[in-house]
Image (tube, rainbow, N blue to C red):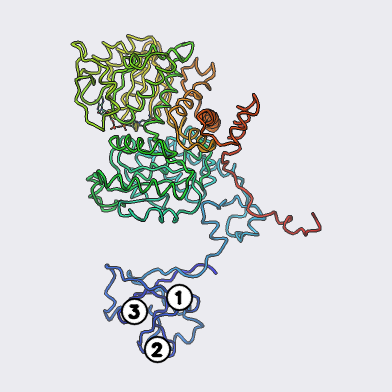
Amino acid sequence: MMRLALRLPLRRLGDKRWYSSADGFDATSSSSKAQPPSEAIDGFSVFPQELPSNAQDPSKDDFINDATSPPRTREQQMEYNKHESLRDWLGRQSRKRSVDEIVVLTGNIHRGSEILHNAVYNKGTGFNHSERERLGVRGLVPPRFFSIEQQAEKIWQQQVVMRESNAPKIARWRHLQALKDRNETLFYRLLQEHVEELAPVIYTPTVGEACLNYSRFFRRARGMFFTKDDVGHMHSMTYNWRGDVKIVVVTDGSRVLGLGDLGAHGMGISVGKLDLYVAGGGFDPQEVLPVCLDVGTNNKSLLNDKWYFGLNSQRLEGGDYYRVIDEFMRAIRHRWPNALIQFEDFQTKHALEILTNYRNDYLCFNDDIQGTAAVVLAGVYGALKVLGGKDRSEIRKQKFVMCGAGSAGMGIVAMLHKAVVKSGGLSEEDAYDNFYIMDNNGLITNERKLEFPREAAVEPFAKARKATKELPDGASLLDVVTKSKCTALLGASTVNGLFTEDVLRQMGEQNERPIIFPLSNPTSNAECTSEEAAKATDGRAVFSSGSPFEDAKGAVSGRLMRANQGNNLYIFPGLGLGALLSGAKTISEEMLVSSAKAISDMLTEDQIRRGCIFPLIKEIRNISARVAVRVIKQAAEEGQAKRSVVAIIESDDEHDTKLYKYVKRAQYVPEYRPTVFPVEESRRTVDDY
Ligand code: NAI
């Protein structure tokens, strides 16, 4: 039976209030003697509920006598008797509706309609003849069959029209979200086929804009919210989720893409990130769980926004905050013991501590700290190739200035420092000399008073950088660049325009090929644009940014500078895939370094000649598979891999190829899978086989 919706008035029954299609109706009497409604009258079930506070007072006469209520007067009873059922009566009367009427949904759902409205199973015009017949969708979709390739082409053309008519990116984001709400398979198909162009629409920078207004854009529930009020219930809440989970992306919305505290709107970032895990890594969309921990927000404009859908309270701090995190972590592990948990966009003061607390006991990592660091390391290895370096050991010759001592900046320098030691062969102490760290107060030296534990990661670099007359604590960026004779300028400061023309020009003067990485997101926060870098260095810079930019030309020679994007997408899907497929229990630093090496190893001679420091993002599925292979091998080296994987590695010299095939086989492919036997098949009898 089709699901039915009836609009009915509220009625008072004694002390109880009921939203009912047949509340207290007694067909034999017009008396108002209240009877609790039966479970179902004429196919309608009834639900006792509390009356909402804003509902009209049902004791008012005009409301009691509303013509849409069941028959009570003699005339009404006679009128009713002419009709077969209460449903007909109510249907006829339903023309007269008041704003206080309640929609009561009852009855069973029709299979065909349900399938069409289920984004996981829906294929739209992609249902073949047998499926239409057997699933009850025949006649419910237009007659012509379109393959997923044709459907994807049609939607893509709509995206192209939007791009060419300069539609706002957010409109493209909404167009894609609407597709995802209708048909997930097609959504991921499109995303996978056009990942280079659509990743910036689904994720940074556009998702930032979406997160700013997420309550307003909210259409359909995705993922899970855990709040401070859920403490004590989180474990049981995980059973509200539909099934198996392989990966969880969790944020507390406290520092979304450099846009600051967006509270519960952070859900947008977890959802977007997991879309990239699916499209780029090949995770099954049915096995991913986006999570937002709503621990309040300190964002005044959100707290004053009447449509804000998060908790209307200040952020939890201290022990209370960590209790929420801890219960959440335990709940996830208890329910899905093998799931990977990825921390996303936690503010620096918590990000490092959370990572430190769980990294040795849980399969988890923080993409802002570790993923960014690995992708920047991959970029530096790639840049060494563009600079004509023989091998990775040349990293020892690089002098880095890092602007930004937050979680991203310090994660990057920690990993680069490790690489200078391991690949470059310098001692730990000597390697510190290759780094100049700056924050909003300028150069950080041994004279700086650091806040603990917040700035613990800065301490070894600060200690090693002795303040001098030339470069005192707090020295300006231009001074630091000039006097350090640095070769690489990195930005994770969230300060747009920090790399001024003077600074960029100076980098160009002291280096034949200066390395310039403005990594802050979104685009509006980038330390410089590709155009500014190309202009100031005459196109000689080896450039990589966090958000996408166009290639740009040098002002004098017209030399084309490649605008690489140091997109974490190169790392996290492959890292996650490798960790899960290997059966590892934790994610080690070496797995991240292996991922970075895998990426730079994929560069072709032609790409290096053109200034590319990363392989092409459109190859992301293969890149992720290659990264996963390295991660699996690293896990095996650490004794973390499961036996079946170790067996492949130990089998013969071809194990790289075998591991690659193993990973490729595990990747989800967005295709329409048959849901029924073809009609001819199903008509066969046992004898036919
Ligand atoms: P954060 O807010 O924790 O840290 C920002 C740091 O920049 C602070 O240490 C602050 O003192 C410093 N800073 C502020 N003004 C400065 C100035 N004028 N000069 C030098 N330093 C200055 O932020 P977090 O989490 O470290 O992220 C920083 C940026 O990195 C964000 O924009 C984020 O989007 C970006 N990021 C980029 C990624 C990528 O793939 N490219 C991945 C993760 C983060």
Q: Residue at x 25, y 25 (%)?
A: 439
Q: Which residue is mark 2?
A: 75
Q: Which residue is mark 3?
A: 66
Query: Mark 2 Cα within 10 Å, few/some/many (few <14, many 20+)?
Result: few
Amino acid type at image mark 2 = Glu
In front of the other: 263 or 76: 263
Q: Which residue is mark 1?
A: 91
- Whether pointer 1 and pointer 3 mark residues with C-beta atoms closer than 8 Å, the reply is no
State the image coordinates of residue 366 (x, y, percent, origin top left): 39, 35
Alpha carbon separation for disc pair 1 and 3: 14 Å
In front of the other: 269 or 398: 398
* Quadrant assignment for ligand 1: top left
Chain-order first, disc 1 or disc 3: 3
State the image coordinates of residue 673 (x, y, percent, origin top left): 62, 48
Alpha carbon separation for disc pair 2 and 3: 14 Å
Chain-order first, disc 2 or disc 3: 3
State the image coordinates of residue 159 (x, y, percent, origin top left): 48, 39
State the image coordinates of residue 41 (x, y, percent, origin top left): 47, 79
Question: Is the C-beta of the residue carrying label 1 under 8 Å from the nearest atom of ligand 1?
Answer: no
Question: Is the C-beta of the residue carrying label 2 under 8 Å from the nearest atom of ligand 1?
Answer: no
Helix, strand or loop status at disc 1:
helix
